[in-house]
Image: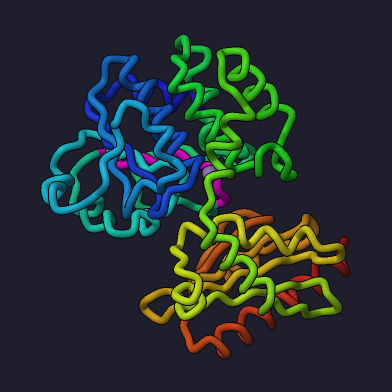
Amino acid sequence: MLDRFAALLDSRDRFLLTAHENPDGDAIGALVGLAHYLRNCGKAVRIVISPELPEYLRFLDTEGWVEVFGDAHADLAAWPETWLLVDASEPQRLGQMLGAFLASNAMKVCLDHHLTENPMGFDHAFVDSSASASAELVYDLASSRMALPMPMAQALYAGMADDTGNFRFSNATPRIHRFAAELIEVGVDPAATYQALYHQGRPERLKLFGRAFESMRFLDQGRYATTLVTQADMDACLAVKEDMEGLVNKALEIRGVEVSCLMYELPDGHYKVGLRSRGRVNVNAVCRQLGGGGHKLASGAKVDGPAKAAQTRVDTLVVSQITFDLSTT
Ligand SMILES: [Mn+2]
């Protein structure tokens, strides 16, 4: 697949690199890595993201290449010859940039590792769900074709670390460990990367976590833990959205919990649902029924309020999925 992807990149000249909205470490790592690769091939490249570059990921943009989509991008649709969506394979995940994407006459291509049955809206889709991170795909593409400069190695390592829970989730394959080892040999510092990614919290973050833990509910004999974070909770803790990073994973530290849910009240009254599975329960199947998706062990969706109705809807689906998956495994 990557040979075909490389050949396609080779045949084009002006690339716009984008990711899903609210880009995570893998999205930014893969974008920056791919930008290095394309520049090395002599291509014109821009990276545009939405709605912002999170503070904790700024260390990956050493060259200052990442542009935040805004008023200056009114003509964005006209610029690229090729529009690349990385770390997603559904155009609607572009968020605010979707309009420009749809209006653009560029060739549209996606590179992704998420499970998508049949990617629509692209001229070419390169999706490999056996990869644990988009950064893994970019590394696989680039490592045999160029010498990796440090900022590129750093970005790709951070992407791999982020999507594998710093190499501790079940998707931490031998392959991604080997790639990570090669990046460490190039000069990436794993401890410094971990610190940069995960040890930059604010006191407000721990206050919010404390409040969320207080309100956590345990259902289905403790196999399902679910937390609701409202805008009022955020205000009470002076917390911002970024402070919630990692909260959804915490309940899986409790013995017996198979599925953890974090439901977050959006400013518009909808609820963002994040689900994480310890390993046996397919939370992607739940999120698909809610109009969302992701991976078997990590998925998300957006549901309508009010809170009570949203909770009941999600709880019912999760508990029946747990019952189903635990009876078949
Ligand atoms: Mn990813």
Question: Which secondary structure dominates the residues rendered in magenta?
Answer: strand
Chain part drawn in magenta: 107-115
Quadrant location of the C terminus in the rendered image: bottom right
Residue 110 appears in which quarter of the rendering? top left
Q: Which residue: 58% across, 37% down? A: 195
* Viewer-side residue, 63 vs 324: 63
Q: What is the x, y in percent for residue 28?
A: 43, 39
Judge whether residue 290 is colored magenta.
no
Q: Is residue 66 left or right of residue 30?
A: left
Q: Is residue 124 left or right of residue 273?
A: left
Residue 244 appears in which quarter of the rendering? bottom right
Q: Which residue: 31% across, 42% down? A: 108
Q: Colour scheme used in the picture?
A: rainbow
- Kindly give the residue lying farthest to the top in the view shown: 147
* Viewer-side residue, 308 vs 285: 308
Q: What is the x, y in percent for residue 205?
A: 54, 60
Q: What is the x, y in percent for residue 240?
A: 44, 63
Q: Is residue 37 left or right of residue 245?
A: left
Q: With respect to residue 17, does 69 lie above or below?
A: below
- Kindly give the residue lying farthest to the front in the view shown: 203
Q: What is the x, y in percent for residue 3?
A: 48, 22
Q: With respect to residue 23, does 325 lie above or below?
A: below
Q: Which residue: 38% across, 75% down? A: 267
